[in-house]
Image (cartoon, grey):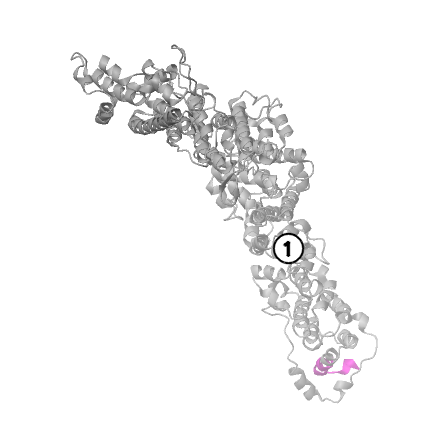
Amino acid sequence: MSSLLSPGKVLLLAAHYATHGDIESLARLASRRAKVLHKELLLRILLTYLPETVNPSTYAGFLLALARDKLEGYAEGELDTTPVEDLSEDEAAKQARKLHLQRLVSAEMPSDFHDNPISSFLVLRSYKMDSEAGLLSQVPSLIAPFLSQSPALRLWATSIVVPYVRRNVEYYADENPAYSLLEFQKLSDSAAVLYLLSRTGGREEDKGFIGRDIRGMVGPWLYGRSRRTSTPAGDNQSAAHDVESSHISAGWTQFLKWLVNQAATSWTVAVAVADQWGGPNDIDLGEVDDLEFTKTQHEYLLQSYARAILASAYLIPETTAEALSGTYQMVYKIRTMLGYSDIPPTMEMALCQLPSLSGTDLPSHIGMKTATYMRNDLLSEQNTLTSPTEGAMALLTALILSAAICTSLGVPCCIRKAGDLTFIQDQREQKGEVTKLIRSASAQVHGDEDRYWSQVRDKLLWLNTWGLDGHQSTDPETRGMLGAVPKEFVETEILKALLSSSRYSLAKSIYEDSPEQPLAAEVIQDTVYQAALRAFDNASNPNRSRGGLKKCDEIIHSFPKTLNKTHPATKRVEALLRCTHALSEYRLTLKQGEPFKPVVLRVHSDPISIIEKVLEQNPKAYTRLPEFLEMAANMVRAGITQQARSVKFDSPAEDNSKELVRAEKLIISLCIEAALREDDFETAYSYVVSRLEAPASGGGGAEGGASQEQDEWSWKAALKAGQYVRTDRTLLPTHLGIASGNPEIRHLEQRIECLATALRVAPTSQLLEILKTFRRCEEQLDSAIAEEAAAEASWAAAGEVPGAFEATPPPGLQSSRNMTATAASKQAEEAPMSLFDLSRATASVASRNFTKLSSLSSSLAGAASLASSATSSTAGDQAPQRLRKRDQLREAATGTLVSGVGWLIGANVNREATES
């Protein structure tokens, strides 16, 4: 029956069957009327009228038979021609001309399909299924049966359909994709790669599928691109490489840029790429699994991928242990891909081993230019840092481990920072980094402290040399991250940390007992001394058996061989501890509400003055003079006084002798003044007459000027004692001895003795003032004696003289210190002993200072006036004319002094003047 149909009706009937999805009837009709329904026409009818919703499995067999021109198997059976039976031939022809069948050749499809109608139909049918029916998921089943028959279709399906379907259906369900299949095919290489990766790693739950996305989407797309741009057979290798560089790299370079950008913004994605993807060989092409890149293509892709991995490592900004460990894994994976020598598989293992870089061909990395390579042109072939060589990878591994060590010690460090420290080699910056690392490490000690500090030391020394041999470690091109810092500096800082952490045994075993001797003895001595002083400065309690002072004591004795007890540094610290501990026994506050801290001793401009505060704040403290003398002496020996600070360790002991004398005189003077403040004149008087001595030079003048300038306290203290006036608050003496029984006379006698001491030790410029005070005191004493004599006379007249006897004492008997003033006056012509226990020897010593008066040209007039009040005016007129002027001045001054204290040595002033 179908053989009787006109060509017009055959076309209309075929369109009817296609419209209703009756593929079997269409195939039967095509088999019977093959001359009318040839292959291209049938494909155009199917393309135009077959609904996109028809499952491809329904007509796949028919298409395969059509492709092979074997439709005979569909000839059996009846055809339903009812749809065209009522049409006339003219009407059928007219309607057939209105079918407007879609052409198989389209400008939108690849030109490779123009000569293959089946492939053209499949491509165009795929476009329609996606855009008009949204049945993208059925496109692979439509194409799959024909892949082996058409290389062009196979390539198109692999590079376009597979990645697109996976992007929008299999991997991520995207109901409204940004591009249709046809639009995706038209995208540029860069845009296509970015679209495929637009959802990769976007959510935390998707980060486990990053490798799958690259393997299943980017890989097939790149493979298709490489095949469509492959060099024709017969071209040489250089031409092939040029083609691959210019065509593959368009999309591939975009992928590498995406990877590098991810490292800078989301390091976990970059780490996951390296961890989950095995490189250019790791590609999932779907149904087509027997395709692969050429050797040249694979080499290009692998080398550029390795460069991108290294670039990504330098760009990861994170400083956490997880980020650095992930970066290490990136380098480890790419080393494995390139077949380089093995390194520990994990960063933790590498940190335990601290591998040496000896024998590694490290690239030259010193200078600012290398530092800029970490920030610019990371994917450039001229960048030595990202060059996929073993040396560049070894350098990056060392930087990763260096950053990890810093982070583990509590100083977060990224790879770029480690690179800056390594490449720029700024010694000052590196020293600061060493200090920060050790300070941070000290704050996080845990577990076995000795073992912990041994590991810290190993890590810091590795940062200094990267484990390079001696000759290599000195090469400026191969220094470690902290290579600009001398090894001695690192060891010294470690020693400081060990001492600060009280790891004395470990420090001693490393720096004193070890045969290697990492540090010179002089360095150890100075470091230990400074560490002891730091412990002292940090102490809050002045008791040496507690806290910081106890630690100071332990530190200074931690190296018994290198720093023994006889070493000047040890002696200084011992003296410092002794004087500080002595202060702990007293109440002492330097500022309101702030207790005394030991560090004040070392920073005070004049630490001996602190003893003055002690005397002020502790009643009766002045009675413990020997303790304060020892305390001051220890301050001098400790080198904390202003003058002693300039004395070096190796200076002879004599350099401190003057300062010791100075300190002793100052302390005695302070105790005298403290006693006077508390109205304990007796103690002050005893200190004056027993502790204050004349200058070592034996007198003043030119010979003793320097000594006198240094001692500005003794004469002042003696003068203050001589100026003290007894009051009701004055403490009474505990015993009188042979002194006068009259308290007032006894007090005046003691004052005069204090003033005599002041005359002995005072500088020349002060003698006149002291003499004036002396004269007033003498007048008061004369007045007191006269009063007592008058009182005795009145008692004698009344017969009430207490203790009087009628017997006259023997002629040669000297007067007693306790005899009455009347009896004493009767023996005045016999040159009696002084009235206040000052022997002739003492008076003779006092007279040594009389020569000072000869230089007092400015005070001569005052001295002469004093002399005229006590000597005859004719004495100077009768002096021999042969005396020199200097002798005349001396006699005048001597006469003045004798008139003031002549009775002290039993002289008769008037008689001596007459005899002269």
Asked if one can make out residue 212 in the rendered structure from this viewpoint, the answer is no
Q: Nearer the viewer, residue 623 or 83?
A: 623
Mark 1 is on which residue type? Tyr
Q: Is residue 110 left or right of residue 287?
A: left
Q: Please determine whether, in this image, residue 323 is positioned above or below residue 653.
A: below
Q: Secondary structure at mark 1?
A: helix
* Magenta residues, start to end: 1-13
**Image quadrant of residue 25?**
bottom right
Residue 3 drawn in magenta: yes
> 32 and 542: which one is in front?
542
User: Which residue is most to the right?
Assistant: 77
Q: Identify the residue position indicated by label 1 in the image.
A: 223
Closest to the observer, 860 or 347: 860
Image quarter hosting the C terminus: top left
Does the magenta portion include 601?
Answer: no
Residue 492 position within the rendered picture, expressed as x and y whole percent measured from the top left: 55, 31
Give the x, y percent position of residue 843: 36, 17
Query: How many numbered badges does the structure rendering display?
Result: 1
Quick check: can you spot residue 764?
yes
Vertical placement of 252 versus 56: above or below? above
The crowd level at tag 1 (other Cα within 10 Å; few <14, some 14-19, many 20+) is many
Which residue, as the protein is rendered here, is positioned at the far front? 798
Q: Is residue 664 left or right of residue 260?
A: left
- Horizontal and vertical percent position of residue 574: 55, 26
280 up-or-down from 864: above or below: below
Q: Quadrant of residue 442?
A: top right
Residue 399 percent location from the top left of the image: 58, 41
Position above or below: 242 against 513: below
Q: What secondary structure predominates along the stretch shown in magenta?
A: helix
Which quadrant would the N terminus be assigned to in this image?
Answer: bottom right
